[in-house]
Image (cartoon, rainbow, N blue to C red):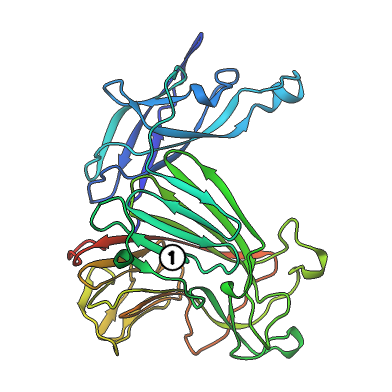
Amino acid sequence: MFTKILLFMLMALSVMVHSLNVPFDLLNWASVTQNGSPVTAGIPLPQGAVTDLSKLRITDASGNTVPAQFRALNRWWWEKNKLGTSQPSLKWVLCDFQPSTVTAKSVLSGYTLRDDFSGSTPTTQLNLTDASDKITVSTGPLKFTVNKLHFNLFDELWLDANSNSTFESNEQIITSNMQNGGTIIAGDWVAGECVNGTIHRSSESAPRFVTIEEQGPMKVVIKIEGNHYAPSNGVKMGLYGYQCFITAYSGKAFVDVQWLVTNYTIVGVPAAVKYSYISWPFSKYTLNLGLNISATQYAILGDSTEFAGAIGASDSIKLIQKRSSFTLSNTAGGKLAQGGAMLTNGQLGISVACRDFAPNNPKGITLTNNNLALELFPDTGLSKYWIDPNARKNHRMRFEFFKGNYIAGNLS
């Protein structure tokens, strides 16, 4: 599962004339050491302390400036609406940085938020190009594209396995595939235009919105919203909606994804395609990634055990988590699976970790030698699913891309 790093701020804010000093500690409560893992934290600021984001910096215990990016979350309402201040001071600021090594189950002290920065923007490996048909992101070791015309999560993806700063054809893990992305299978409801078994995909049509939510030296966040459509016999307004947030980090070969299946009216949607007060039945929802590799090894993380082995062209490994137990196609299973999986061909590989996999049951993962499918709503054969009106179902996951063989224990 994702390693969780919690930022604990000291309650005392030392605010002097023309000087801000907010000390804070990092607590790594995971059982593994963190090396430069991204940290995102919101820090409250006293009224009148800081108005200019460009003056903020983070220093470590030695007083060295740590590369970071900042975003204003809120400003003091009183200053703007009662005092008429044109640029109110910051009330909450979002900080992103990558701290040095934090050993397992330990506290790293000595970090301070200050307002005396006078240097230049931190150097970064991040690069984003926004074209009419796609967004291209490079983190340094990783490059991927987001298709604006047919959204399928990662349209293409490369890993710079030989570290020569060039993304070569033999380093491409994902090629453009319209079967990738969100796939939902309709249930039977004639009045709602639902034809049983009809496949609707996020890639069947252009997203409604593709926006760059954040772009800085430490991370970029892309937000994509749209509906699932079928080429024929489908729900005309789309079988439910999706929202996706893709977060990429400077220098990292992993990407965080938040995927939501939605059933509500999004601001800006024409009245003719409102979703309110409609709930369609469906039997399965999958987030699919077809791969440009023929994997020879797989691993799936159960409750406390990694199940691993060889995988061939005709093999399918399936994990299903129900309320109190999980089953795995080639083992006896167990109680609460942690929801991680891996595929590699010995040269290039992909792993995924799903947050709260067992608590958000039922859930599933299916692996073949060239496909990774996250079953956000698996077909259990027992009943249909619905998304309540004005509701959404949220899923968070991290995809990491690596070179070489899989190292036992990495998933756990």
302 to the left or right of 57 = left
Q: Is residue 412 visible?
A: no
Residue found at x 60% / y 52%: 211
Figure quadrant of residue 210: bottom right
Residue at screen point 25% across, 58% down: 161
Residue type for callout 1 = Glu
Q: Quadrant of the C terminus?
A: bottom left
Q: Which residue is mark 1?
A: 156
Quadrant hosting residue 209: bottom right
* Residue 168, percent from left and from top: 32, 61
Q: Quadrant of residue 204?
A: bottom right
Neighbour tally class for label 1: few under 14, some 14-19, many 20 plus, Cα within 10 Å: many
In the displayed structure, 237 sits above or below 95; it is below
| Towards the viewer: 296 or 3 | 296
Residue displayed at 55% across by 18% down: 49
Pick whichever, 405 or 323, lies toward us. 405
